[in-house]
């Protein structure tokens, strides 16, 4: 991805556009001065002499003087070098015009103006600076736009990389917890262990193979949550009571995969303590096809302290929500009458 970005933004201005610019600029000058003097042959000859000089000076400034001096903050050296270049251009341009085009080297001047006079030198230098400034401004503008797009692409790449990393964290986090549960059942020689292994394999298939896309159907995510609940019911038997309610049409809604499971895990962490039972209610609501509302409620044990190392899931989800939805989502957690509540609202995209 990074190499493709670099290739995209290298050689920003294709060679054909250089040719098109100079041909277009030449034609404008040719027509302008031909019309001004009423002599298109003179305009053609003078422009054929002067334009190669314009081009050489312009590219000398863009590709040598600016990188060597301006970008290194050697401004005095740049000014001196540019003055020397302009002096050379003046001598060459004036000489070529005199010997190849006309001895009247400044026909548009009022009165009799000679070469190497102050006025003529000033007029030629201003003309050259005009061309140099115009082309340099175009080049710097294109470079600025290119760098901006490249930075935006790099930021997007960074966000996508972080999102992939955060999503990948959920999988080992979940399997770590489940394998710990399975280990406890095996130690107890519980008959539930084989069923837990089968249910875990179903969930692994979903996590490993079905969540590679940036978005998945909400129904698929709900099926995954339901499988997780069934796994917890296998572990704890009648101690777990769960209910999923859906309001509105959610068939076509898609969400980032593995976005909601950490909230369900968190409910079990807050709800279980010793031999406590847990009642979990989960709600999904499509609000006017603009917003998806997800709610989870479970009984809350004030004495159940969740160790910090198990908090990776919620921290992960908060960061993913920030990256995915910026300020267009809301996440609220609160305790009401010994009930732990999670309310998540995200836009339907």
Image (cartoon, grey):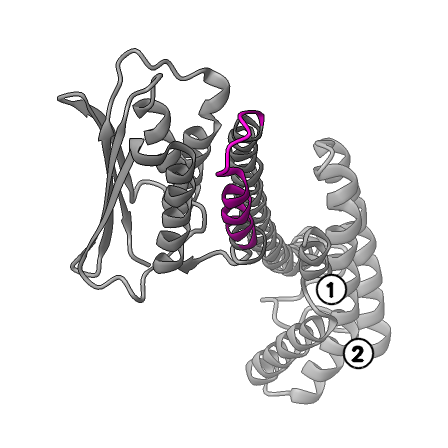
Foreground mark, 2 or 1, reads 1
Range of magenta residues? 187-205
Q: Residue furthest left?
A: 337
> Measured from the top left, where is residue 90 in percent x and y?
78, 57
Residue 101, numbered label: 2
Q: Is residue 28 magenta?
A: no
281 lies left or right of 210:
left
- Within the magenta stretch, is there residue 191? yes
- Quarter assignment of residue 307: top left
Q: Between disc 2 and disc 1, whose residue precedes?
A: 1
Q: Which residue is mark 1?
A: 54
User: What residue is drawn where x is 86% and y is 74%?
Assistant: 99
Predominant SS of the magenta segment = helix
- Of residues 77 and 9, the one drawn nearer to the viewer in this rendering: 9
Disc 1 is placed on an element classified as: helix
Q: Residue 50, can we see it?
A: yes
Q: Which mark is residue 67?
A: none
Q: Residue at x 69, y 51 (%)?
A: 2
Using the image as rendered, state which of residue 293 and residue 303 is in the foreground.
303
The answer to which quarter of the image holds residue 68 is top right
Q: Is residue 230 left or right of residue 136?
A: left
Q: Residue at x 44, y 40 (%)?
A: 320
Position of residue 108 measured from the top left corner of the image (x, y, whole percent): 61, 71
Q: Is residue 152 visible?
A: no
Q: Position of residue 149 (x, y in %)?
A: 56, 53
- Nearest the eye: 71 or 211: 211
Residue appearing at x 43%, y 34% in the figure: 235
Above/below status of 3 relative to 230: below
Q: CA distance from mark 2 to mark 1?
A: 17 Å
- x, y percentage for residue 104? 74, 73
Considering the image in quadrants, where does the N terminus appear? bottom right
């Amino acid at each position: 991805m990074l190499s493709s970005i670099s290739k995209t933004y290298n050689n920003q201005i294709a060679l054909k556009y250089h040719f098109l610019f100079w041909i277009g600029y030449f034609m404008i000058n040719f027509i302008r001065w031909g019309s001004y003097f009423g002599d298109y042959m003179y305009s053609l000859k003078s422009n054929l002499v002067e334009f190669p000089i314009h081009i050489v000076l312009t590219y000398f400034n863009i590709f040598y003087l600016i990188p060597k001096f301006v970008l290194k903050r050697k401004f005095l050296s740049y000014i001196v070098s540019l003055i020397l270049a302009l002096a050379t251009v003046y001598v060459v341009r004036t000489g070529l015009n005199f010997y190849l085009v006309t001895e009247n080297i400044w026909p548009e001047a009022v009165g009799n103006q000679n070469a190497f006079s102050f006025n003529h030198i000033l007029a030629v230098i201003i003309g050259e600076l005009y061309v140099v400034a115009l082309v340099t401004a175009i080049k710097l503008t294109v470079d600025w736009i290119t760098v901006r797009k490249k930075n935006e692409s790099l930021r997007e790449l960074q966000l996508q990389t972080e999102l992939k990393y955060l999503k990948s964290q959920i999988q080992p986090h979940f399997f770590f917890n489940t394998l710990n549960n399975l280990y406890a059942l095996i130690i107890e020689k519980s008959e539930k262990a084989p069923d837990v292994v089968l249910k875990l394999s179903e969930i692994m298939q979903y996590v490993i193979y079905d969540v590679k896309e940036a978005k998945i159907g909400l129904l698929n995510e709900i099926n995954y949550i339901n499988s997780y609940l069934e796994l917890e019911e296998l572990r704890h038997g009648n101690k777990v009571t769960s209910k999923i309610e859906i309001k509105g049409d959610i068939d076509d809604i898609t969400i980032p995969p593995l976005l909601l499971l950490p909230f369900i895990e968190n409910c079990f962490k807050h709800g279980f303590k010793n031999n406590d039972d847990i009642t979990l209610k989960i709600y999904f609501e499509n609000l006017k096809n603009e917003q998806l509302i997800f709610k989870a409620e479970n009984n809350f044990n004030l004495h159940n302290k969740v160790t910090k190392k198990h908090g990776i899931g919620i921290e992960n989800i908060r960061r993913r929500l920030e990256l995915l939805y910026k300020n267009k989502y809301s996440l609220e957690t609160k305790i009401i009458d010994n009930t732990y509540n999670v309310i998540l609202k995200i836009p339907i995209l």
